[in-house]
Image (cartoon, rainbow, N blue to C red):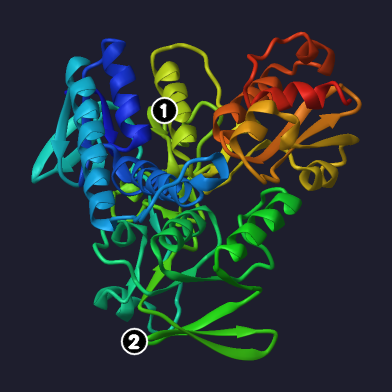
């Protein structure tokens, strides 16, 4: 009998188990594949490892701009993959050690909810039944596979890949077609373009990068095109053959040949075949419904991470896990989604938090948008010869508080959280003006912007 059973060992699951164990609860964490989940094993961490290698390679190629000559610079994809595997092993070992230190028991296998009895929730794993007084569901998500003719067949044959297979390739495809222009597709496309692939991105919407700032997205795409990447926007994929992707754009039929195809059109919550129906957990559009305390409609059942479909980001999952455990332990805590940063880790990075100009106005806010070139930052200018990045603040004129921020720049992932803090704490522009930023840093661009309000 456990105080808490956690289904899933990804960011939400393992952190929840760790926090609960630290609070003195007896905890069982059940993971069917690898501790660390998609993020650690086939998502956030491995993609960033590849992208850093690509960035290092590009810096070597263009070192002459900074007075550094590098002869015969080359990217060894096999060694990049080897290093990626080493990074994953190190971090997974760290997760295992942390769980052990907090006295969390871990079982490998698929957990299935059998039902509920007088003691708690009965979970079957590896043919054994275990019981927990409380249940946290953190089963994550999987790549969405739409009903496109030939898609499933070509996935089975290996011509079409998900991000998992793309991170394991030992050979660089000469031609890579990417279906989907969101974060996953763009990050993988960016790496493979650097590694030598001829990359074509096919996106159904009329823009890439989801709901990011429209101006910055256009600038990012222009930079990609300068690197040789091709884009088909407003284009619908109709069929996958054994050698190509068939599409339609404005009534015109297109055929895009490729050596490999990457499918990256989003993810779906893993709620099927885990027994939710046996305890009547409510779902909507395949995701578990949760309130601000991460509670489901069933008492003592919580859900965190991608499985609730609210914000499929690892850092969201971490915070949701903390909120769930705090409430389980009797500490009042609520989840807020208004200041969750999002980052596209290409070169340059595109980071955003809160509202964009378009979303703020759609909500009826009276806002002022402050836009400034990144070249106003001495650190940025020193490290980006010919760089044309920009940053924006979206300020609510009524309250004089920041409601959103965006930046297209190296290091933007590291300082966007500062703007998120402004949103969370509702600091006014006058409050922010009193904050001292270290000099020289790229983050000083924030100070430059607030003084232009």
* Residue 268 in the figure: left or right of residue 31: right
Say which of 146 and 419 sits in front: 419
* Residue 315 in the figure: left or right of residue 205: left
Residue 361 image point, x, y percent: 85, 44
The image quadrant that residue 135 belongs to is top left
Residue 336 visible somewhere in the drawing: no
Say which of 121 and 197 sits in front: 197
Residue 178 image point, x, y percent: 47, 69
Packing grade of label 1 (10 A; few <14, some 14-19, many >=20) is many
Residue 198 image point, x, y percent: 46, 72
Q: Residue at x 29, y 25 (%)?
A: 17
Total marks drawn? 2
Q: Which residue is drawn at 90% across and 28% down?
A: 397
Looking at the image, residue 134 lies above or below residue 179: above
Disc 1 to disc 2, C-alpha distance = 42 Å
Q: Mark 1 points at which residue?
A: 321
Secondary element at tag 1: helix
* Residue 308 in the figure: left or right of residue 80: right
Q: Mark 2 points at which residue?
A: 242
Q: Residue furthest left?
A: 127
Looking at the image, residue 251 lies above or below residue 261: below
Q: Quadrant of the N terminus?
A: top left
């Amino acid at each position: 009998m456990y105080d808490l059973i956690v289904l899933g060992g990804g960011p939400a699951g393992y952190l929840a188990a760790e926090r609960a164990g630290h609070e003195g609860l007896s905890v069982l964490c059940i993971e069917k594949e690898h501790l660390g989940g998609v993020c650690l094993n086939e998502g956030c961490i491995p993609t960033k490892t590849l992208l850093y290698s690509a960035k290092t390679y590009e810096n070597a190629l263009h070192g002459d701009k900074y007075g550094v000559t590098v002869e015969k610079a080359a990217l060894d994809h096999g060694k990049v993959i080897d290093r990626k595997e080493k990074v994953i092993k190190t971090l997974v070992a760290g997760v295992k050690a942390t769980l052990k230190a907090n006295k969390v028991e871990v079982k490998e296998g698929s957990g299935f909810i059998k039902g509920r009895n007088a003691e708690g929730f009965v979970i079957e794993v590896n043919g054994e039944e275990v019981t927990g007084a409380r249940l946290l569901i953190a089963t994550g998500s999987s790549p969405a596979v739409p009903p496109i003719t030939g898609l499933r067949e070509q996935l089975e044959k290996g011509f079409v890949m998900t991000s998992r297979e793309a991170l394991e390739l030992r050979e660089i495809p000469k031609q890579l077609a990417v279906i989907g222009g969101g974060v996953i597709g763009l990050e993988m496309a960016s790496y493979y373009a650097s590694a030598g692939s001829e990359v074509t991105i096919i996106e159904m919407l009329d823009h890439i990068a989801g709901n990011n700032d429209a101006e910055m997205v256009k600038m990012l795409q222009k930079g990609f095109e300068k690197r040789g990447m091709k884009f088909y926007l407003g284009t619908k994929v109709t069929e996958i053959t054994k050698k190509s992707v068939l599409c339609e754009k404005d009534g015109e039929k297109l055929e895009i040949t490729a050596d490999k195809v990457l499918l990256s059109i989003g993810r779906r919550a893993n709620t099927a075949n885990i027994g939710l129906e046996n305890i009547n957990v409510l779902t909507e559009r395949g995701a578990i419904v949760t309130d601000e305390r991460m509670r489901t409609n069933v008492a003592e059942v919580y859900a965190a991470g991608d499985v609730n479909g609210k914000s499929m980001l690892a850092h969201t999952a971490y915070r949701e896990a903390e909120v769930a455990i705090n409430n389980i332990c009797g500490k009042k805590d609520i989840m807020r989604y208004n200041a969750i940063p999002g980052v596209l880790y290409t070169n340059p990075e595109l980071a955003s938090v809160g509202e964009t100009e378009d979303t703020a106005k759609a909500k009826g806010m009276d806002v002022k948008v402050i836009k400034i070139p990144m070249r106003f930052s001495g650190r940025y200018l020193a490290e980006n010869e010919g760089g044309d990045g920009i940053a924006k603040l979206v300020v609510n004129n009524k309250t004089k508080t920041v409601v959103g921020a965006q930046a297209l720049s190296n290091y933007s992932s590291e300082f966007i959280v500062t703007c998120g803090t402004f949103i969370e704490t509702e600091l006014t522009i006058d409050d922010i003006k009193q904050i001292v930023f270290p000099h020289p840093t790229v983050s000083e661009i924030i100070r430059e912007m607030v003084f232009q309000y």
